[in-house]
């Protein structure tokens, strides 16, 4: 019985520690986007050899993470204080949601049909980057 109680307590502590708030969750999600795009950018620029399997894998990861972009859960009212998220998000939530939906649709389409060469990868990253810039320019405070 004692082992069971200790195991249950340890599991409860681990579950509590793994549950972050919306700010931490959205920051982690954005970092995951950056990690996937960071794998693709050197290939698109010709700094690394084009690798179709690596492109497909990175796009699949990006798509899986984009599917987790739940605006309501990640941007609840009052979660902008002390972050780079501008109040415009909550003032224009429908527009913000539409931009997120466009990004998700574009990433999903690319993951379903990955670019077959460096030039097509560059164009694809231009599309994804445009989606990112669209939100960041409107809804994220400029750094420094």
Image: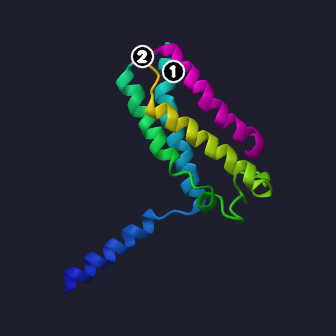
Is residue 28 visible to the viewer in this orientation of the structure?
A: yes
Point 72% across, 65% down: residue: 78
Residue 105: image x %, image y %? 57, 40
Q: Nearer the viewer, residue 20 or 2?
A: 20
Magenta stretch encompasses residue 27: no
State whether residue 94 is above or below residue 58. below
Name the secondary structure under disc 1: helix
Say whether marks 1 and 2 touch (CB < 8 Å).
yes
Q: Label 2 belongs to which residue? A: 50
**Residue 143 — which label?**
none
Point 71% across, 57% down: residue: 82
Magenta stretch encompasses residue 137: yes
Q: Earlier in the sequence, mark 1 or mark 2?
A: 2
Residue 44: image x %, image y %? 51, 18
Q: For the C terminus, which image quadrant?
A: top right
State whether residue 104 is above or below residue 6. above
Residue extent of the magenta highlight: 117-144
Q: Label 1 belongs to which residue? A: 121
Dot 1 alpha-carbon crowd within 10 angstroms: few under 14, some 14 to 19, many 20 or more: many
């Amino acid at each position: 019985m004692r082992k069971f109680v200790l195991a249950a307590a340890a599991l409860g502590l681990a579950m509590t520690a793994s549950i972050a708030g919306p700010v931490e969750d959205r920051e982690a999600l954005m970092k995951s986007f950056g990690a996937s795009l960071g794998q693709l950018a050197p290939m698109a620029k010709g700094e690394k050899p084009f690798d179709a399997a690596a492109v497909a894998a990175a796009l699949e990861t990006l798509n899986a993470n984009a599917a987790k972009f739940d605006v309501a859960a990640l941007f609840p009212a009052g979660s902008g204080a002390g972050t780079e998220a501008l109040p415009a998000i909550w003032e224009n939530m429908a527009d913000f949601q539409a931009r997120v939906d466009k990004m998700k649709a574009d990433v999903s389409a690319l993951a379903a049909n990955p670019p077959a060469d460096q030039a097509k990868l560059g164009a694809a990253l231009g599309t994804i980057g445009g989606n990112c810039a669209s939100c960041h320019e409107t809804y994220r405070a400029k750094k420094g």
